[in-house]
Amino acid sequence: MKKEKIYRVFSHLPELATERLTLRKMMVLDTQDMYEYAARPEVTKYLTWQPHPDRDFTREYLEYLGNRYAAGMFYDWAIVYDEENKMIGTCGFTSFQCAHDSAEIGYVLNPEYWGKGLAAEAVRCVIKFGFERLGLHRIEARFIEGNDRSRHLMEKVGMTFEGIHREGMLVKGNYVNVGVCAILASDWKSLCDAEEDISTELHRPE
């Protein structure tokens, strides 16, 4: 996969849709919605960044992202819950290893919407985009040890737990153990084929 393809695709970030969600570019108008969750310590406990100190910080961050999107150098979507037309988190790619046709995925969700399957819905959509639109071979996700909720989500969408990197990252002044889960293009195809078989069986006439 060539870097030029990444820049070309993400400089005009395509809007994606699922049953309950719209994934689109983050905008300054999302300031209040983002601040609602980005300011909460329980959200950032297992993330690499600190809670947003105030709404001005959130707004300035979103203004900065506008330039990153235009340059094709930011790969995250806003997760919009269609029922409320509200931004409730983000999901996208944190990095690409173009020489290996692989990428890392990341996500965060407002706690008010935990337990509804919305994060998994968004992650599946981005994984599908990665394999079917970008032609990736491998997509992985990392979690700080102890974040069992995140690991469960990764496995729920079809990723395989591959192990722990001991003290693999320096986060907020501490070395932390980092778990890795991943899914291959062949795994994704098998999952899609299985779902198609189930759907066919359910709609088979008596």
Image: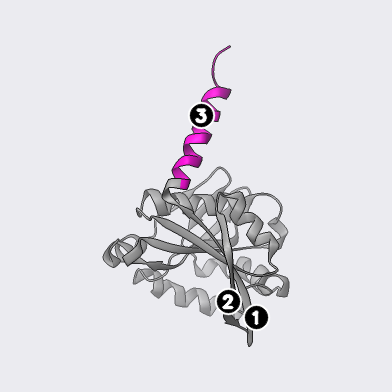
Name the front one of labels 1 and 3.
Answer: 3
- Disc 2 versus disc 3: nearer the observer: 3
Q: Quadrant of residue 19?
A: top right
User: Rounded to the nearest whole Å, what is the CA distance between mark 2 and mark 3?
Assistant: 45 Å
Occupied quadrant, residue 198: top right
- The relative height of residue 139 versus residue 132 in the rendered view (above or below) is below
Q: Furthest-top residue in view?
A: 206
Q: In the rendering, at what x and y percent does residue 51 appear?
A: 65, 78
Segment tinted magenta in the rendering: 187-206
Towards the viewer: 53 or 85: 53
Q: Is residue 190 magenta?
A: yes
Expressed as whole percent of the image width and height from the top left, the position of residue 146 reads 70, 68
| Residue at figure coordinates x 65%, y 80% from the top left | 54
Q: Which mark is residue 58?
A: 2
Amino acid type shown at disc 3: Asp
132 sits to left or right of 182:
left
Magenta region, main secondary structure: helix
Mark 1 neighbour class, 10 Å CA radius: few under 14, some 14 to 19, many 20 or more: few
SS at badge 3: helix
The residue to which callout 1 is attached is: 54
Q: Secondary structure at mark 2?
A: helix
Rendered view: 155 above or below 174:
above
Q: Mark 1 belongs to which amino acid?
A: Asp
Q: Which residue is mark 3?
A: 197
